[in-house]
Image (cartoon, rainbow, N blue to C red):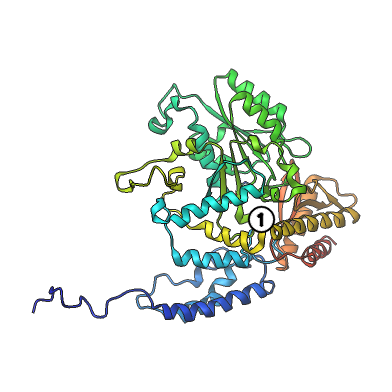
Amino acid sequence: MSNTSPAAPLVPPEPGDLPPEVFEAHATALARWVADYLRNTERYPVLSTLAPGEFRQRIPDAAPEAPEPLEAILADLDRVVMPGVTHWNHPAFFAYFANTASVPGILGELVIAALNQVGILWRTSPALSELETATTGWLGRAMGLPEGWFAMLTDTASVSTLQALAAARERDPSLGIRHEGMGGRPEVPRMRIYCSEHAHSSVDKAAITLGIGAANVVRLPGDDAYRMRVDALEAAIAADRARGYRPIAVVATVGTTSTTSVDPVDRIAAVCAREGLWLHVDAAYAGVLALVPEHRHHFAGLEHADSLVVNAHKWLFTPMDCSVLWTRHPQLLKRAFSLTPAYLETAEQDVALSQSDYSFQLGRRFRALKLWFVLRAFGLEGLRERLRHHCALARRFAGWVEAEPGWRMLAPVPMSVACFRHEPAGMTDEAALAAHNARILDRVNASGQVFLSHTKLGTRYVLRLAVGNVRTREAHVALAWRLLREAAG
Ligand SMILES: *Cc1c(COP(=O)(O)O)cnc(C)c1O
C-alpha cells in the first residue's frame, strides 16, 4: 500500500505543542513562584551584582538537541536567571524612573501571551484594535485631554516620539519626502527640531532615524528651574529661518528626565502656532499625573499640542512595554505610515481602524489588554491615590535632606523625584564634590538594599531619588536616607 494514501496517518504520533495539562500544572507552579517573588522581592539585591560576561558563562554554547523537562527549565530560573536580574519590582528601586509590574499588569501579560494576537489588520484582532481605542480613550478623558484626539499604543516613548516627528516631517507634502527621500535633493531644506538642553535623548535618536540628523536638533538653554527658555526658542527659529533652514517641530517636556521640570507648554504652543511648527509634548514619565486634579496645572497649554507621549509602563504600573501616543492629526500619521500591499487589502478597510496604518510596525501586540486590567483593577481613584502617595514620599525625603546640615536639595520637587547631594563643610571644588557624591552613590548601591542613580545639572553632579514603584512605602525611602547618611559619614 502506498504511504501517500490519504487514509494513512502521516507520522504517528504527529508532533505538536506540549499538552494543555502540562501548561496547567506548570502555570500553577509558576504562579506560586511569581507570588513568592512579589512577596519577597526585598531578599534580592536591587541591582544585580554580576560582572559583565558572567551571566553568559552560565548558559551553554548550544541549544539542547533533546527536549528538556519543564522542571529543569523552571529550576534554572532561580539558579541561573535571578542572579542576573536587576529588580525593577523592588520597592527600594529609586533609580531613573520606576517601571513596575503590578499584579493586574502581570495577569494581563499572561493572557496577552496566551491569546497571542497579532494586530496587523482590524480583522486579525478586532478586540486588540478596538480595546486599544477604548482604553487610550479612557485614559485621555481621565487626564482631561481634548475630545477627539487619536491615540494608539507603541512599545516605548522613543518610538512614539519617532512616529510623531515622522508625521511632523510629512506635514508639507510638497517636499515629497515619503516618496523621494531626502538625499541628493538640493530643493529639500535643512530641517530643524527644537527642544531644551534637558530633553530626552530619544529626540536626537528620532532625528537620526528620520534622516533629519542629530546636528539639526537644536538644544535650547533652560532657565534656572531647568525649563526651556522661550526667548531662546524664538531667537533660534529666527536665526534658522534667516539661514534658509526649515523649522518643523518643537519638543516640549513635561517632567524632564533629570529634575522633572516642566517646559512652559502654553507659551511654546503660542510660538508654534505663530511659526507653523508641530508641537510634540514628551510627558513619558509625568503624563499620568494629569489624572490628579491638583497636578493638572503642570499641563497648562497641553490642549494646543499636535502630539503627546505618555508611558503607561512608567508611572501607571503597567509592565514593560506600553507607551501611549496621542495626536490631533491622525491623517498625517497615516500619510507617513500607511502602506497596503494587495495581500493586506480587506473589505472593511474603509470602516475599520487598523493601527498598523498609523505606525511603523505592522504586527502589534495586544498591549491594550494589560492597560485594561490595570485601569480596571486599580480604578482611577486607586491610581490617583498611589500617584499622590509617591509625590508625598518624595517631598518628605526632600524635607529630611533640607533639615540635615551638609545636605542640600538642588532642584524643586514638583512631582516624585528629588535631586540632592552631600556638600560637606569646606568642600567647594566641583570635582571633589562630584567624586565625593559618586562614592556615596556607589556605597549605597553596593549595599544591595536600594538603587539610586545620578544626573548632571549644568556642571554639578547630583544624586537623584525617584519614587514611582507601586510597592514603595515610607520605610523604603527612610532606608535610602539612612544609607545615604551612613555612606557620607
Ligand atoms: C523615559 C523617558 C523617555 C524614554 O522612554 P522609553 O519608553 O524608554 O523610550 C523619553 N522621554 C522622557 C521624558 C522620559 O522620561
Residue 117 at x, y = what percent? 43, 60
Residue 431 in view here: yes
Residue 172 at x, y = what percent? 48, 27
Q: Judge whether 296 appears above or below 180 on screen.
A: below
- Residue at the spot 58% in from the left edge and 62% down from the top edge: 373
Q: Residues within 10 Å of mark 1 (few under 14, many from 20)?
A: many
Q: Is residue 457 or residue 124 the one in the foreground?
A: 124
Label 1 CB less than 8 angstroms from ligand 1: no
Q: Is residue 13 or residue 222 the one in the foreground?
A: 13
Residue 405 at x, y = what percent? 91, 55
Residue 467 in view here: no
Q: Taking 275 as reference, is 475 left or right?
A: right
- Secondary structure of the residue carrying tag 1 is helix
Q: Is residue 158 or residue 106 the one in the foreground?
A: 106
Residue 194 at x, y = what percent? 62, 32
Q: Judge whether 210 appears above or below 90 on screen.
A: above
Q: Quadrant of the N terminus?
A: bottom left
Residue at which label 1 appears: 315
Q: Quadrant of the C terminus?
A: bottom right
- Residue at the spot 90% in from the left edge and 49% down from the top edge: 426
Q: Judge whether 85 appears above or below 359 on screen.
A: below
Type of amino acid at the residue the image marks with label 1: Trp
